[in-house]
């Protein structure tokens, strides 16, 4: 099974455990996995026996590398089941929103790669425990999509304009970066995950969400975490002043030029700028506008906005071309619909921000 669903008996109460179980694809989410996870959460939300939920990935390489967009390639080209992309995004967004709003504590356990939809899923968890090898990124600009599944919400809550920088450059954050900006709460050794699960099963959970949340909070605070001074050096600590200065402009083309021409001689920074340079110009505009609009939005409206954006992306050529270049032919030479950010017409961008759904028309039926 690509998603393993378990109900772990504790000294008192039960834990609902979801394990993304496709290590060969870095636990990338498929429609089947999303459907099974949603059904489990819907059931557990009203099951008095289930006191908390844990989400983890199988294997040591990844928590989740995002949505399995490779599987959507043929449909995006107009072949086979052409309704698959819309179904997948609609269901994925509803799942992440459900995790954000779940009425019981949700703990995310993440090791290795946490990218795109994987970071969306982890960020939706109330508590995020990671291992030292964790790597977080929103690299959608490389495939002609945009940072989605709630990224307009959680990227806007990062310090300064780091969220904008992450969206434009696909910047890869290490464990120290993640702790520094609040994308992770606690770091433990990978070998300590099993003992943490055993500890949780030794607890007496009450079935009262507030009491169980407090109990989980106190237990995690007592968990032996790794000293940050022994972890990898923070990229952000070295570059956050440059990021703040270079992203401070009011015009996107100028901001992009400033980042690309900063002349900072550092491998991590060079990787960021290379991603931006080769990335989809339309995506850069989507990042720019989604973060501005998202500042004034509720979580529900953020998910509605992003679904409209995603569905428009499935109708345009850039997403299929990005998947082709990165994952199918792997030539890494995408031919984007526009060569530069300055060439993208405003009308192309604005089409991504319609329609405006409400409680009666929302295809996700968010509550």
Image (cartoon, rainbow, N blue to C red):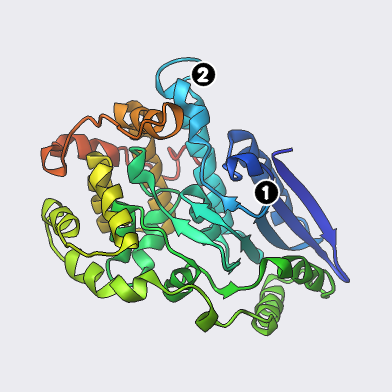
Q: Is residue 317 visible?
A: yes
Q: Is residue 330 above or below residue 23?
A: above
Q: Residue at x 47, y 29 (%)?
A: 85
Is 15 left or right of 136, judged from the image as shown? right
Say which quadrant the N terminus sits in: top right
- Residue position for label 1: 42
Q: Residue 82, which numbered label?
A: none
Q: CA distance from mark 1 to mark 2?
A: 27 Å
Q: What crowding class fits label 2: few (fewer than 14 Cα within 10 Å), some (14-19), or many (20 or more)?
A: few
Give the structural element (helix, strand or loop) at label 2.
loop
Report whether 55 appears left or right of 286.
right
Residue in front for this viewpoint, 178 or 232: 232
At x 80%, y 73%, the residue is: 199
Query: Eyeballing the image, is 292 above or below 196?
Result: above
In the image, which is nearer the foreground, mark 1 or mark 2? 2
- Residue behind mark 2: 81
Above or below, comparing residue 135 to residue 281 in the picture: below
Say which of 325 and 197 sits in front.
325
């Amino acid at each position: 099974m690509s998603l393993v669903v378990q109900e772990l008996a504790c000294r008192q109460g039960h834990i609902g455990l979801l394990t993304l179980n496709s290590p060969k694809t870095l636990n990338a989410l498929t429609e089947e996995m999303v459907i099974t996870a949603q059904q489990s959460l819907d059931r557990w939300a009203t099951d008095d026996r289930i006191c908390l939920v844990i989400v983890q990935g199988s294997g040591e390489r990844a928590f989740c590398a995002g949505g399995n967009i490779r599987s959507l390639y043929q449909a995006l080209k107009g072949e086979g089941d052409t309704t698959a992309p819309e179904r997948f995004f609609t269901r994925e967004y509803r799942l992440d929103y459900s995790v954000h709003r779940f009425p019981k504590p949700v703990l995310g356990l993440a090791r290795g790669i946490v990218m795109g939809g994987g970071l969306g899923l982890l960020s939706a968890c109330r508590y995020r425990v990671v291992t030292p090898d964790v790597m977080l990124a929103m690299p959608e600009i490389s495939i002609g999509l945009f940072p989605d599944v709630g990224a307009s919400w959680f990227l806007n809550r990062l310090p300064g304009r780091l969220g904008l920088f992450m969206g434009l450059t696909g910047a890869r954050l290490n464990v120290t970066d993640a702790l520094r900006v609040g994308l992770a709460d606690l770091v433990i050794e990978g070998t300590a995950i099993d003992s943490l699960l055993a500890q949780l099963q030794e607890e007496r959970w009450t079935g009262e969400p507030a009491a169980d949340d407090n109990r989980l909070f106190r237990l995690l605070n007592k968990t032996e975490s790794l000293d940050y001074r022994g972890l990898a050096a923070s990229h952000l600590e070295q570059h956050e002043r440059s990021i703040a200065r270079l992203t401070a402009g009011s015009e996107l083309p100028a901001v992009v030029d400033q980042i690309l021409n900063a002349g900072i001689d550092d491998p991590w920074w060079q990787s960021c700028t290379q991603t931006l340079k080769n990335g989809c110009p339309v995506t850069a505009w989507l990042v720019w506008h989604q973060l501005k609009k998202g500042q004034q939005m509720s979580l529900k409206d953020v998910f509605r906005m992003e679904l409209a954006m995603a569905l428009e992306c499935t109708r345009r050529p850039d997403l299929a071309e990005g998947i082709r270049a990165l994952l199918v032919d792997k030539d890494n030479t995408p031919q984007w619909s526009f060569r530069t950010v300055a060439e993208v017409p405003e009308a192309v961008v604005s089409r991504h921000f319609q329609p405006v759904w409400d409680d009666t028309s929302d295809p996700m039926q968010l509550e």
